[in-house]
Structures are given as C-alpha cells and as structure tokens.
Image (cartoon, helix red, strand yellow):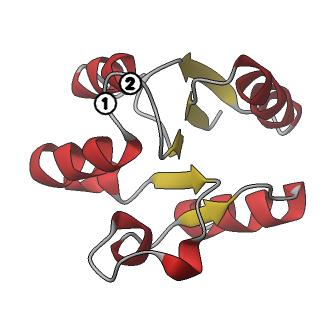
Amino acid sequence: MPRVLIVDDEPGLRFALKRWFERQQWQVTEAPDGGRALDLLRNVTDATIPDVIVCDLHLPVRSGEEIVHALRREQPALAARVLLTTGDAVSHAEPTSVLNTHPHVLQKPFDLATLRAAVERITGA
C-alpha cells in the first residue's frame, strides 16, 4: 500500500486530503507543522517511508521551503517526493524561490485531477 505524509496547518485541508488518499487506498500520516514533519521524515524506516509528501509552503515551526532544503541536504530521495502546495502566485515567485526551483508545486486551490496527475508524476505510476 502506498504511503503519503500530509503536512498542513489547516485541519480541514488535511482532512480532505486524507480522505481522498484513503479512498485511493493510500496509508496516510499527518503533520500539522513543519517541525513535526521533519521529525517524522528524519526517523523514517523502510516500513514508514512516504511515497509522496504533500506539504504546504507556509507552515508553523518550519516552512515547506525549509523542509525541502533540509531534505535536499539530508535525504535527497525524499526531497524529490515533496509536492509543495501554496496559495502564493507561483508565476510571480522570485527566480531562486523554491516555487521555481522545486519540480513539484501545486497552486491552491487545485482540483483532484490535478492532484492525481502530480502524484502520478512523483510516483511514476
């Protein structure tokens, strides 16, 4: 069963994403902030490693950008599995912003077909 880590400080969005992934037969883990997410990711095992990490850009404790940078340094294979979500205007991001340098970014609001396509790009499914 594929695994996803959902990182978002909005409980309603986490719930909606959790429900969608569970309906797709995914095992879901949640984190309400970037600090908790990094703790989980730094302690993954073969049995808990997520296939996809859906991570909001703006989070308490550690931002999505900080998570991506930490994973690029510490666990590059996991960094490639991060799907950043943001309400920011991606087209207006600075050239060096993670919104322009990271390959997997979804601008909110997004529909489920767009989410599915992004997940498939990450997993190769």
Q: Pinpoint residue 33: horizontal percent, then vertical percent.
A: 45, 21
> Image point 57% across, 20% down: which residue?
29
**Nearest-to-viewer mark from 2 and 1:** 1
Q: Pinpoint residue 44: horizontal percent, then vertical percent.
A: 30, 24
> Image point 34% across, 75% down: which residue?
101
Please report contact status of discs 2 and 1: CB closer than 8 Å, yes or no: yes
Cα distance between the residues tagged 2 and 1: 9 Å
Judge from the rendering whether residue 19 lies leftward or rightward of residue 41; answer left or right. right
The secondary element bearing badge 1 is classed as loop
Type of amino acid at the residue the image marks with label 2? Ala
> Of the numbered discs in the image, which one, if any, rests on residue 97?
none
The image quarter containing residue 115 is bottom right
Instruction: Tell me: residue 8, above or below residue 73.
Output: above
Judge from the rendering whether residue 97 lies leftward or rightward of residue 31; answer left or right. left
> Image point 71% across, 18% down: which residue?
11
In the picture as drawn, the residue positioned furthest to the left comes out as 73
The crowding category of the residue bearing disc 2, from other C-alpha atoms within 10 Å (few below 14, some 14 to 19, many at least 20), is many
Task: Judge by depth and name the residue closer to the eye, 24 or 82.
Answer: 82
- If the image is split into quadrants, where does the C terminus sit? bottom right
Judge from the rendering whether residue 13 lies leftward or rightward of residue 70; answer left or right. right
> Of the numbered discs in the image, which one, if any, rests on residue 62?
1
Instruction: Tell me: residue 48, above or below residue 17.
Output: above
> Of the numbered discs in the image, which one, if any, rests on residue 37?
2
Q: Pinpoint residue 95: horizontal percent, then vertical percent.
A: 32, 83
Q: Earlier in the sequence, mark 2 or mark 1?
A: 2
The crowding category of the residue bearing disc 1, from other C-alpha atoms within 10 Å (few below 14, some 14 to 19, many at least 20), is some
- If the image is split into quadrants, where does the N terminus sit? top right
